[in-house]
Amino acid sequence: MKVPFLDIAGAHAEIQDQLDEAVLRVARSGSYILGPEVEAFEADFARFTGAPHCLGTGNGLDALVLALKAMGIGPGDEVIVPANTYIATWLAVSFCGATIVPVEPLEATHNIDPEAAAAAITSRTKAIIPVHLYGQPADMDPLLQLSERHGLHLLEDAAQAHGARYKGQRIGSFGEAACWSFYPGKNLGALGDGGGFTTTSPELAARVSMLRNYGSAVKYEHELAGQNSRLDPMQAAALQVKLQVLDDWNARRQAIAARYLGALSASGLVLPAVPQWADPVWHLFVVRHPQRDGFRARLEEAGIGTVIHYPKPPHLQGAFASQGHARGAFPLAETLASEVISLPVGPAQTEAQTEYVIGQVLKLA
Ligand SMILES: *Cc1c(COP(=O)(O)O)cnc(C)c1O
């Protein structure tokens, strides 16, 4: 048997007619920048997240950059980010000219440690960006308290967690704003690049709306030095179709994760810990193995696709060499990078495939 890490085309096959119709509709519309398709998706996605405003952007990284710029964050400001995240979270801060202040994760969930965040606050701190990593919500209550006590912006990086809930409430509506990626492999993925910004603040919404569109609210009037990063209408139309099945597809991921959690407890692997307040959407099912690379090769041999999220933390990347973080600066993030491996999980994965993965993992771990 073969089990791909994620079969996007296989999942799309279920909704192929609607996707084809959506793409063709835009191709034939004569309207190719922003417009009704983008507005319709923005309205539906805002409703989905529970935030009143949504703006579509070119991708998730740009959504983060635009959000920070809209908040007025720039040189001299410090932004607290997880040491253990995809590099986009860090790059967004550096693109704004602000200072990246990384903090270690909690070992149980790999998500940002609120106490470490509290300890990192200085008089220059302007924002905290928790990442709902792997589709698992970060612990928002202590972070909300910190942001209120210190007057900080709280920006959720929700790129991996469309639909996840914290204490029963969907993530993306806790801080004043959240950023989303619609990269094809994400839980809500487009047929190419796409991103989004949701917010409870009409002021931030108005600023991001301008910043994504050359700083302009009225054609050829440029009030801000904006950039060009707009959600493509063809992607918006495809996302509209996929938003209808998102809860169902997340439920399938949850069923696979529940099966893994039950059956793999005897495997010796460190399995994901799920706090009682969390309803994760399992963008990734990440386990730890002390000899991860050998384990991964044995799974590959058995026809099982896996991915490492992520093999090298941002502070050890060449892109951030100038920041001077030595190896050992964030030991937990570094240990996780050397031990994590993501097992297959996705909406097109069959029960037989899940059972096969379980059997092989129990044998090969
Ligand atoms: C995917 C991702 C992003 C960036 O999204 P793109 O659409 O690829 O630019 C940002 N943050 C996290 C945590 C991500 O996983």
Image (cartoon, rainbow, N blue to C red):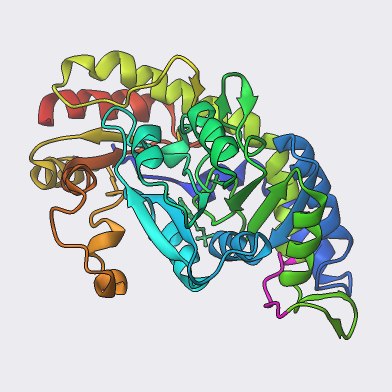
Nearer to us in this view, 94 or 167: 94
Residue at the spot 31% in from the left edge and 36% down from the top edge: 286
Residue 359 visible in image: yes
Report which quarter residue 194 is drawn in: bottom right
Image spot of residue 6 (x, y percent) = 42, 45
* Position above or below: 338 against 356: below
Q: Residue 229: within the magenta?
A: yes
Residue 17 visible in image: no
Q: Residue furthest bottom?
A: 220
Predominant SS along the magenta part: loop
- Split into 4 quadrants, where in the image is the N terminus? top left
Position of 70 with respect to 335 (left or right) is right
Q: Residue 96: within the magenta?
A: no
* Position above or below: 29 against 135: below
Position of 30 with respect to 306 (left or right) is right
- Split into 4 quadrants, where in the image is the C terminus? top left
* Position above or below: 211 against 173: below
**Magenta region: which residues?**
225-232
Image spot of residue 251 (x, y percent) = 56, 25
* Position above or below: 198 against 77: above
Residue at the spot 15% in from the left edge and 62% down from the top edge: 326
